[in-house]
Amino acid sequence: MKTAKKSKGKVTNKIKAMRTTQTSLTQEELGKRVGATRQTIIAIEAGKYAPSMELAFRIVQAFDAAFEDVFQFDPNG
């Protein structure tokens, strides 16, 4: 008998929306501000990569926003 695989959840974010509407930063500019590559920012925005806590906090600070305004956790994702 197979058991259902339990979801670990998924980190989602609003980085792209905030980056384009609030700051007009390019992915490369945001990456430079937070110490990450453009490719890392692309992967985070696409939901393919969850950043480390340190990087997540640097991203939040770049937007001068509350953590939960930028990152969300979907336990069913």
Image (spheres, rainbow, N blue to C red):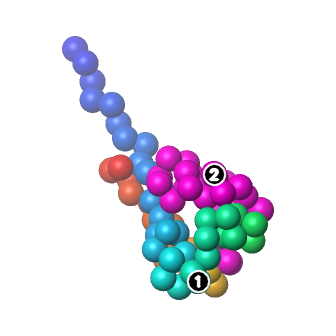
Q: Position of residue 73 (x, y in %)?
A: 44, 60
Residue holding disc 2: 39
Q: Position of residue 49 (x, y in %)?
A: 55, 48
| Identity of the residue drawn at 45% across and 59% down | 12
Q: Which residues are magenta?
A: 35-62
Membership of 46 in magenta stretch: yes
Residue type at mark 1? Thr
Q: Position of residue 46 (x, y in %)?
A: 47, 54
Question: Could one spot residue 53 in this view of the protein?
Answer: no
Report crowding for label 1: few under 14, some 14 to 19, many 20 or more residues within 10 A (C-alpha). few
Disc marking residue 23: 1
Residue type at mark 2? Gln
Tell me if 2 is positioned left or right of 56 in this view.
Answer: left
The overriding secondary structure of the stretch rendered in magenta is helix
In the image, farthest residue toward the top? 1
> SS class of the residue under badge 1?
helix
